[in-house]
Image (cartoon, grey):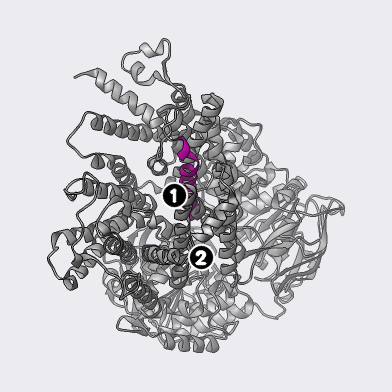
């Protein structure tokens, strides 16, 4: 990660009374204990980071504070008085607001309308008035945004500013941010940090949920580490010896996620993209051989989706730009085989890769059905048997095949999708954010399977997780605004260090 | 603030489907009977007459069996389309077109032997119904026009077309001005099975029902149709020929309704006349939804709603209650089933803390 | 060219299009809030009966008008509760409502077939009625038509320049944002559905109080479905809805005149005109590719949180 700005001097508040105190909060989802007796305090003028890996319980905890979830046990106090929130509305009224990973903005309306929704002055509205108010508020906190803009036209970073404005317009005293930098370029991240410092300087309390050690160390005044639903430790940045120490507390293991990777044998070309112009992309030239992993990285929304959809047949690219297994796109997709071809593992596990209300057998058949046909009929019995075998081999819990897709956990669902696609013995695998939302164990397993799959396929790995890319890939391509701005082998340390700059579109140094 | 909150179930409540339908039926019947009082009729008498006209009377049950034939066939078609989230509301119009097709065949070739004429009539009905459904399908695929409204509009047009034909070119010159075609020749009539009072339309139902069930269970195309119900995106991901599937499903849907029209015209009326249109196409939608789009429950639900129709006819006879009363019941049944289905996915629980 | 005939035809178009306009705006309001209501046909029918009976028994057409609106609102409430409260499939619920509504109308209305109730009659607006051409078309109508002139403007103003209007628009696009803003998405949806239903009911009332003063069966004749189609044709904007409503009004008026003058065309084929035109209009709108105007959360029920 590149240079983060120096922190301006902290507001010298004496150890003030906490704005919010959480005492013994507990929350269960079915059989999963997401939060186990958590006790924490949040003070004004400070940035508290909630650190933990995926599934540690950070979002659940803040969900309760923000009123979206109801605690099963324990209490919450605001300014010393116990509160119970039946809805986000009540939490907001109590001064607690949350900026979520998925923005809750009405794309078709303007910034001003979105910010003042629920806060409008009076019964009759004047757009000009609303825009003026929002402009004043933005100026006060030095946020650069045009109140008249249509939200649908804004970038991710600008949309996040709108979310912040929403909270500021409601005089929120506690602002909670859930993984806010996931969708930002480094420059936008810097602007966000400045905004956070500006807010704490004016007495707000900020909670910053993250799993990224670098950022937490750069921005937090206090760090609370969550693991498996409990508070593992509470520290100040000065108390931390090294990143490794922090990582150990976070994961319980000594080492950051790493995997052993031996070079695989590189064979024939399976994907060739030449001078692809169109679909929001410019001058894309990429190629992939069997046996290697090419990681495409970049901030979400810079063309990766368009690229993946074109390669995977969901949208049609211009003529003679994409060649799959040696065939031009149109010819390949006219009648693709089910086996020894292209396998797509999408980011959207439940909505695209599987049918949520159907069982594992039906989901298995989704892309392998032609392998079970005899004439017009389907060999159901064989499909059930093969599915059982896959469930056993990949240890997909629960061990039944009649379970429905939506009942599986994220990790097990991804394993099921992987099992199905690898069953097809593909020559080309397109894997999109394959470990998003998975815990450490599942992530390691998925990585292992993908690396093993190099024996039969070339893998196009599209991911926003730089660590994942660097662990798995042989070569890396960085995308920015629909272009590939850099392409290099992962062994080139010099280039690897510049990835952050490439992701922000800086190409000349 | 209520102390109850809504909790999503971990697994759908399996036994709920039957409980919900029974509950809905009971509620709707009760509400409907009470409504009689608003028109100055005795609800008690209404209930008695309803019973006498349905389960209290063997002839009524036989009549219901006969009526369940067109409802069943139309409903099969509706279910096939609904499974793919293609909202075919046009069963009524496709039914009419099927009848028109069959009539055309019957009137054009009266001299053919039964063994040839009947299949020709069936074929004409299947084609007519299928093509009538293909129009909205084409509009949906090519122009993304909502099939809900187009199928509905085509219902109105189909009924008017039927009127046009029986008032005009196909009118029986000997009918004293009544709008109807001449009687079909004996070769065009679907007769009774052996010595019973049931006609061969039942055999058609059996073949269609079993055929469809087997189709969905055992064939590749049947699987693809089930998968296609998840939407166009998943279809594209899995390489399903979504456009073809939509067209296929609508054609089959329309063909089944057309078949119903043929059977009803041939076996029950023996000629084409406007009284053929009794709203079976709309009842079919209620049946399909009640039966959760599955063939065997559709058969049961078709019979139940046919029984209801017969009972309402008795109410009309004995208590001069307008026939539209049945629509009130059907509407209430569907609404209460919709409300009840909520409880298959969610339950109410106490709020803690 | 006899201008008189043209003016008369256009005036008839306005009159005939007015119930459709009410219904279209009503459905549009419901859809703006995210609730697809296919029960418009049944609602117009019931509202027509309610309006007729109220006017018949109280002697006041205005009370009848209000009663029609109320009837529409009640049925919309039923649909709203099923969809918003019980997460019922919006398409199927609307259909059920139509079946129920048509049944209720026939059941309760049959004894009154052929009877007349006090209704609204045309009168000339002093001054404006003497304008050339426009005067004859627009200002020699009944009171409800004059009410309908204000409606599209009021509709726009409500949605664009008032607080509840903004909230309704937001809930039809993204209910999650509305909840995050501290409002009640479910209540807003219900409100949009019921308010829309009220307008639809007014359209139904027009049919039995102004369009005719007699009660017959089948008064709505598919106008409800045309209204649903017109919302799409109008790209969810009130201005275009006016154009669409008067267009269909014109077609229906034209069709009546043609039948009255004893043409050779069989009446059945003539009657097909509005329905065929609806399909055509939908195809053309879709061809222009403006599907993006639909409220993003239309037809999608709001699931309760954990």
Q: Residue placed at 56% from the left, 56% from the top? A: B47
Looking at the picture, how far across and down is residue A123, in whole percent?
64, 31
Would you place residue A504 above or below residue C174 in this image? below
Residue C37 visible? The answer is no
Q: In this view, does A446 lie above or below B160?
A: below
Please give the chain letter of the residue carrying mark 2.
Answer: B
* Region in magenta: C88-112
Whether residue A505 is visible: yes
Examine the image and state in which quarter residue A276 appears: bottom left
Check residue A303 in the rendering and tell me which mark sits there, or answer none.
Answer: none
Q: Measuring 42% from the left and 64% from the top, which residue is drawn there? A: B64
Q: Residues within 10 Å of mark 1 (few under 14, many from 20)?
A: some
SS type, badge 2: loop
C89 is within the stretch colored magenta: yes
Q: Position of residue B281 (x, y in %)?
A: 38, 57
Tell which circle, 2 or 1, labels the residue nearer the N-terminal end.
2
A235 versus B95 height, above or below: below
For the residues beneath circles 2 and 1, the answer to whether they share a chain is yes
What residue appears at the point 67 percent right and 80 percent down from the top-left corner? A255
Front-most of residues C172 and B303: B303
Q: In this view, does A116 lie to the left or right of B298?
A: right
Q: Quadrant of residue A170?
A: top right
Mark 1 — residue? B323
Which of A465/A443 is in front?
Answer: A443
Asked if residue A1 lies left or right of residue B209, the reply is: right
Give the residue at mark 2: B55
């Amino acid at each position: 990660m590149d240079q983060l700005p120096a922190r301006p001097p902290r507001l010298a508040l004496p150890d003030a009374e906490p704005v919010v105190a959480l005492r013994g909060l507990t929350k269960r989802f079915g059989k999963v204990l997401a939060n186990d007796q958590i006790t924490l305090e949040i003070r004004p003028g400070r940035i508290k980071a909630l650190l933990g890996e995926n599934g540690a319980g950070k979002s659940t905890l803040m969900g309760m504070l923000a009123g979206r979830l109801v605690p099963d046990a324990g209490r919450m106090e605001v300014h010393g008085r116990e509160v119970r929130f039946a809805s986000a509305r009540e939490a907001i009224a109590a001064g607690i607001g949350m900026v979520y990973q998925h923005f809750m903005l009405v794309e078709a309306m303007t910034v001003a309308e979105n910010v003042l929704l629920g806060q409008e002055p009076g019964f009759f509205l004047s757009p000009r008035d609303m825009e003026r108010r929002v402009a004043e508020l933005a100026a006060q906190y030095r946020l650069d945004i045009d109140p008249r803009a249509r939200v649908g036209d804004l970038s991710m970073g600008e949309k996040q500013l709108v979310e912040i404005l929403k909270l500021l317009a409601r005089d929120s005293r506690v602002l909670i941010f859930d993984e806010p930098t996931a969708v930002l370029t480094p420059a936008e991240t810097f602007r966000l940090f400045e905004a956070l410092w500006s807010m704490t300087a004016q007495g707000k309390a900020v909670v910053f949920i993250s799993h990224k050690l670098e950022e937490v160390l750069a921005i937090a005044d206090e760090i609370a580490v969550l693991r498996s639903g409990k508070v593992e430790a509470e520290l100040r940045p000065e108390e931390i010896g090294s990143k490794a120490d922090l990582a150990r507390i976070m994961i319980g293991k000594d080492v950051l996620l790493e995997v052993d990777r031996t070079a695989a044998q590189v064979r024939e070309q399976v994907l060739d993209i030449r001078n692809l112009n169109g679909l929001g992309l410019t001058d894309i030239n990429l190629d992939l051989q069997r046996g290697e992993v090419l990681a495409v990285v970049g901030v979400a929304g810079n063309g990766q989706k368009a690229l993946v959809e074109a390669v995977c047949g969901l949208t049609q690219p211009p003529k003679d730009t994409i060649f799959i297994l040696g065939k031009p796109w149109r010819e390949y997709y006219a009648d693709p085989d089910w086996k020894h071809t292209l396998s797509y593992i999408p980011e959207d596990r439940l909505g695209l890769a599987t049918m949520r209300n159907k069982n594992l057998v039906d989901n298995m058949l989704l892309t392998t059905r032609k392998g079970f046909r005899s004439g017009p009929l389907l060999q159901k019995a064989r499909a059930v048997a093969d599915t059982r075998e896959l469930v056993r081999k990949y240890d997909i819990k629960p061990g039944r095949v009649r379970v429905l897709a939506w009942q599986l956990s994220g990790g097990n669902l991804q394993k099921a999708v992987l099992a199905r696609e690898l069953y097809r013995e593909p020559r080309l695998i397109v894997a999109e954010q394959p470990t998003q939302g998975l815990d450490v164990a599942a992530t390691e397993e998925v990585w292992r399977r993908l690396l093993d799959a190099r024996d039969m396929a070339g893998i196009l790995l599209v991911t926003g997780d730089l660590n994942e890319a660097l662990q798995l890939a042989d070569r890396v391509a960085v995308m920015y605004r629909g272009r590939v701005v850099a392409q290099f082998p992962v062994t080139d340390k010099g280039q690897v260090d510049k990835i952050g700059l490439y992701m922000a579109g800086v190409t000349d140094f | 603030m209520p102390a109850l909150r809504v909790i999503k179930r971990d697994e759908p409540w399996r036994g709920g489907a039957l409980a919900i339908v029974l509950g809905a039926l009971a509620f709707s019947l009760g509400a409907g009977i009470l409504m009689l009082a608003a028109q100055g009729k005795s609800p008690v008498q209404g209930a008695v007459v309803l019973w006498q006209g349905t389960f209290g009377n063997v002839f009524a049950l036989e009549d219901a069996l006969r009526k369940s034939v067109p409802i069943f066939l139309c409903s099969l078609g509706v279910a096939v389309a609904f499974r793919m989230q293609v909202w075919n509301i046009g069963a009524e119009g496709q039914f009419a077109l099927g009848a028109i097709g069959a009539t055309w065949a019957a009137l054009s070739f009266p001299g053919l032997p039964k063994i040839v004429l009947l299949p020709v009539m069936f074929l004409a009905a299947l084609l007519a119904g299928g093509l009538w459904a293909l129009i909205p399908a084409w509009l949906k695929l090519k122009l993304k026009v909502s099939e809900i409204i187009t199928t509905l509009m085509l219902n109105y047009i189909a009924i008017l077309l039927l009127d046009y034909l029986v008032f005009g070119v196909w009118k029986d010159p000997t009918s004293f001005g009544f709008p109807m075609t001449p009687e079909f020749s004996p070769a065009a009539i679907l007769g009774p099975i052996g010595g019973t009072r049931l006609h061969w339309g039942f055999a058609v139902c059996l073949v269609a029902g079993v055929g469809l069930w087997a189709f969905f269970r055992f064939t590749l195309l049947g699987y693809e149709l089930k998968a296609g119900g998840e939407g166009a995106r998943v279809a594209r991901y899995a390489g399903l020929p979504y456009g073809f599937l939509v067209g296929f499903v609508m054609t089959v849907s329309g063909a089944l309704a057309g078949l119903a029209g043929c059977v009803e015209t041939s076996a029950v009326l023996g000629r084409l006349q406007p009284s053929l249109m009794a709203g079976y196409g709309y009842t079919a939608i209620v049946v399909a939804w009640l039966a959760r789009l599955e063939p065997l429950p559709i058969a049961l639900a078709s019979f139940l709603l046919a029984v209801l129709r017969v009972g309402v006819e008795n109410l009309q006879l004995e208590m001069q209650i307008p026939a539209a009363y049945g629509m009130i019941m059907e509407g209430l049944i569907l609404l209460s089933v919709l409300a009840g289905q909520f409880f298959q996915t969610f339950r109410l629980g106490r709020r803690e803390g | 060219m006899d201008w008189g005939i043209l003016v008369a035809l256009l005036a008839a178009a306005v009159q005939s299009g007015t119930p459709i306009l009410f219904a279209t705006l009503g459905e549009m309001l419901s859809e703006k809030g995210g609730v697809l209501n296919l029960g418009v046909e049944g609602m117009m029918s019931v509202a027509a009966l309610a309006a007729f009976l109220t006017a018949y028994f109280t002697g006041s057409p205005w009370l009848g008008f209000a009663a029609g609106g109320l009837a529409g609102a009640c049925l919309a409430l039923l649909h709203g509760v099923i969809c918003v409260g019980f997460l019922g499939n919006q398409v199927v619920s609307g259909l059920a409502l139509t079946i129920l509504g048509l049944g209720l109308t026939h059941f309760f209305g049959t004894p009154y077939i052929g009877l007349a109730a006090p209704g609204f009659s045309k009168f000339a607006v002093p001054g404006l009625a003497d304008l050339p051409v426009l005067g004859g078309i627009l200002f020699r109508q009944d009171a409800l038509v004059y009410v309908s002139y204000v409606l599209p403007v009021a509709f726009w103003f409500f949605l664009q320049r008032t607080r509840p209007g903004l909230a309704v628009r937001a809930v039809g696009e993204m209910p999650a944002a509305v909840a995050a803003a501290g409002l009640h998405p479910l209540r807003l949806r219900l409100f949009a559905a019921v308010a829309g239903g009220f307008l639809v009911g007014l359209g139904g009332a027009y049919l039995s109080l102004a369009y005719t003063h007699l009660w017959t069966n089948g008064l709505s004749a598919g106008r409800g479905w045309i209204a649903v189609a017109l919302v799409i044709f109008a790209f969810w904007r009130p201005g275009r809805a006016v154009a669409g409503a008067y267009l269909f009004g014109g077609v229906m008026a034209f069709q009546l005149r043609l039948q009255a003058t004893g043409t050779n065309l069989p009446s059945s084929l003539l009657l097909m005109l509005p329905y065929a035109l609806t399909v055509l209009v939908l195809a053309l709108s879709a061809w222009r590719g403006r599907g993006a105007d639909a409220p993003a959360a239309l037809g999608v029920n709001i699931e309760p949180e954990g």
